Image (tube, coloured by chain):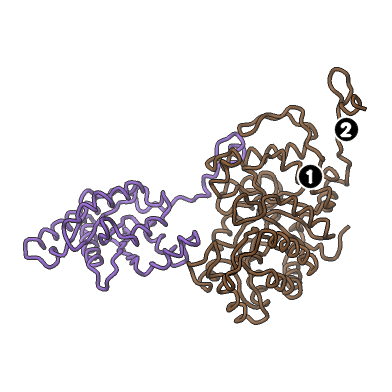
Chain colours: A brown, B purple
Amino acid sequence: MLNHRESAMQFGIFSVSDVTTDPTTGRTPSEAERIKAIVAIAEKAEEVGLDVFALGEHHNPPFFSSSPTTTLAYVAARTTRLQLSTATTLITTNDPVKIAEDYAMLQHLADGRVDLMMGRGNTGPVYPWFGQDIRNGIPLAVENYALLRRLWDSDVVDWSGRYRTPLQGFTSTPRPLDGVPPFVWHGSIRSPQIAEQAAYYGDGFFSNHIFWPKEHTQRMVEFYRSRFEHHGHGSADQAIVGLGGQVFVRRNSQDAVREFRPYFDNAPVYGHGPSLEDFSRETPLTVGSPQQVIERTLGFRDYVGDYQRQLFLVDHAGLPLTTVLEQLDVLGEEVVPVLRREFAALKPAHVPDAPTHASRVTARGGAQDSTVPARGDDVTGRTVEEVSA
Amino acid sequence: MTTRTLAVVSAGLGVPSSTRLLADRLTTATVAALRERGEDATVEVVELREHARDLADAFVTGFPNAALRAAIETVTGADGVIAVTPVFTASYSGLFKSFADVLDRDALTGTPVLLAATAGTARHSLVLEHAMRPLFAYLRAVTVPTAVFAAAEDWAGGEGTSQELAGRITRAAGELADVVTGRPASARPADPFADVPSFEDLLRGNP
């Protein structure tokens, strides 16, 4: 069922789930506090009319989100409309079997309001904790995702590869909801191989965008679009593109700058480096009034073309929960409604809308129950359940 | 007449600086040497002092800002490079190394480079051979055999030492001009998107 908000382009927020000291007070929230805060942020995103909430996956402090499907399932139970996603799901160090299971499970519980974004993870020490090696990052992403696709697209999988024990007659359960697996985005900052992967499968490509000059994002997206066309999924401008963005907004732009500067100056990623003004010039960071955020965001289209998903980072660098919720109020009330209208007016008809479960089920020709019944063993034809009954 | 581009990287900090002074003399001599070989040259100077904050920012943010990008492109797109650093604490200066650190590993592959350094005393002169030349060897640049060192005595000293410096400058400039003229006009840095393997290759395990 489509509702009025399920429009051509999706707007939402993504969180890296950092636990960071508030530089203005010196106070560091507890993990418990941040975990409850992220749920409040997700609920607020739905309340103010945003479309997407995406959560990162990390396995080292200062991040809390090691298990995004747990959090997203909880959010799913407390929301009705919000699309749940990841930023990112580690395709290198997670077992693709577990990804297939976890996200299909989440898909059922959330009535299809689930997609996910694959990422390699760039923290070297994490790989060996999961038995892997960062030097194999690209081949791991390629092989693991190829297996994930098989597990979702085929009921019974025989498989062998370089990075995982082989599978014989394996069925990943539950089967994808309505026989349609979650839509997949591939996120990469600087590896054209991942843009090539997204293009090969006709999946979405998400550019983090926020820590790099626009020329960089432009090249990656252009490359993805041209390869999407090469692999026969449609014309380049029909490829599915998502972008990150980073904003701090107050009604009055001087207030925004004054309030955000100490957070910027001490932020883990870029703090103690360039000035807020320099970084705003070099990257999509926008600190200012709603009108400034609207104009800057509309400008993204000038260098990536019509795109399907815009996610904003709003809850990092130690910003307190109340401030984040206020940011969401302004985004929902003053920024996103204008962006929806303006982007929609600019988008040609042949450019696809953001994919949703509903649109993908329709494209597949309707929902089908994909439950795979338990098979009997080869000798007796009976199942374990029958034997123990 | 072919026109070559020369990029001059100076890590001098004073104004005026003896490092820049040496860079200028090497540049003048190289342009003259190219003319003798029938080639013209345009010269672009990158004063690293002007990019000190840009370099610090690049380390923190992970990308060079627009001003630093322009400097990097000047150097990596040149037909020949004259690189001059003061000696600080037994090596090239931190500012000079910082610039080397923001270059792509392959950006200077095959580029002819003339090495030069300055210091208060000639006792530092082997910094050229023991620190600077290995740095450019790692970058697979083509360094010319004569590296030029100028100590305080070369500038202030009597007729003899100044003449020796002038002789080294002429010899080094001639070597750089020889290498530059022996090569096709500047091959621009490789496009990282040009050789991405097809996904079929990636699936076969050839990333």
For the point 69% across and 37% down, the residue is A147
Residue B137 is situated, as x and y percent measured from the top left of the image, at 32, 46
Write down the residue under mark 1.
Answer: A104
Pick out the residue farthest to the top.
A379
Tag 1: amino acid:
Ala
Q: Do labels 2 and 1 share a chain?
A: yes
In this view of the protein, which residue sits in the foreground, A331 or B77? A331
In this view of the protein, which residue sits in the foreground, A372 or B181? A372
Image quarter for residue A382?
A: top right
Structural distance between the alpha carbons of marks 2 and 1? 17 Å
Residue A187 is situated, as x and y percent measured from the top left of the image, at 63, 52
Q: Along the polypeptide, which appears first: circle 2 or circle 1?
A: 1
Tag 2: amino acid:
Pro
For the point 26% across and 62% down, the residue is B86
Residue A150 is situated, as x and y percent measured from the top left of the image, at 73, 36
Q: Is residue B81 above or below residue B200?
A: below
Write down the residue under mark 2.
Answer: A373
Q: In this view, does A357 lie above or below A42?
A: above
Q: Is residue A371 visible?
A: yes
Residue A321 is situated, as x and y percent measured from the top left of the image, at 69, 69
Pick out the residue farthest to the right.
A389
In this view of the protein, which residue sits in the foreground, A307 or A189? A189
